[in-house]
Image: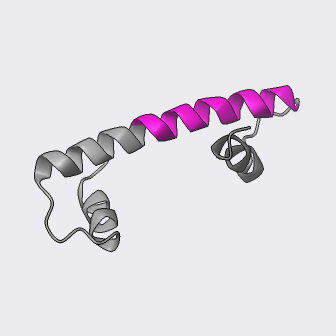
Amino acid sequence: MLPLLPFERIAKKAGVKRISREAVEELRDTMDEYATEMAEKAVKVSFHANRRTVKAEDIAFVVKGG
């Protein structure tokens, strides 16, 4: 499980003055799900390109909706 502090920093950088622990946990869990989904899609893209290595361009492609 990812630590909470980096997500609290992200929220504060976005302008949040105060954030509950539950909100930070929800942000972390949501981002974890999103990152897992993007990684799974990137694996499919690299497989389609006949590679076993996922590259930054694969991640960028799936994040942009490819």
Report x, y in % for residue 57: 76, 50
Q: Is residue 22 magenta?
A: no
Report x, y in % for residue 29: 31, 39
User: Position of 37 compared to 65: left or right?
Assistant: left
Asked if 56 appears above or below 29 in the picture, the reply is below
Q: Nearer the viewer, residue 12 or 52?
A: 12
Instruction: Please state the extent of the stretch shown in magenta in the rendering.
Output: 33-49
The answer to whether one can see residue 1 in this image is no
Asked if 36 appears above or below 9 in the picture, the reply is above
Q: Is residue 46 magenta?
A: yes
The answer to whether one can see residue 4 in this image is yes
**Dividing the image into 4 quarters, which one contains the C terminus?**
top right
User: Position of 59 compared to 19: left or right?
Assistant: right
Report x, y in % for residue 20: 11, 54
Q: Residue at x 75, y 39 (%)?
A: 53
Q: Quadrant of residue 42?
A: top right
Q: Residue at x 74, y 45 (%)?
A: 61
User: Position of 66 compared to 51: left or right?
Assistant: left
Q: Nearer the viewer, residue 57 or 52?
A: 57
Q: Residue furthest right?
A: 50
Report x, y in % for residue 35: 50, 41
Q: Quadrant of residue 18?
A: bottom left
- Magenta stretch mostly in which secondary structure? helix
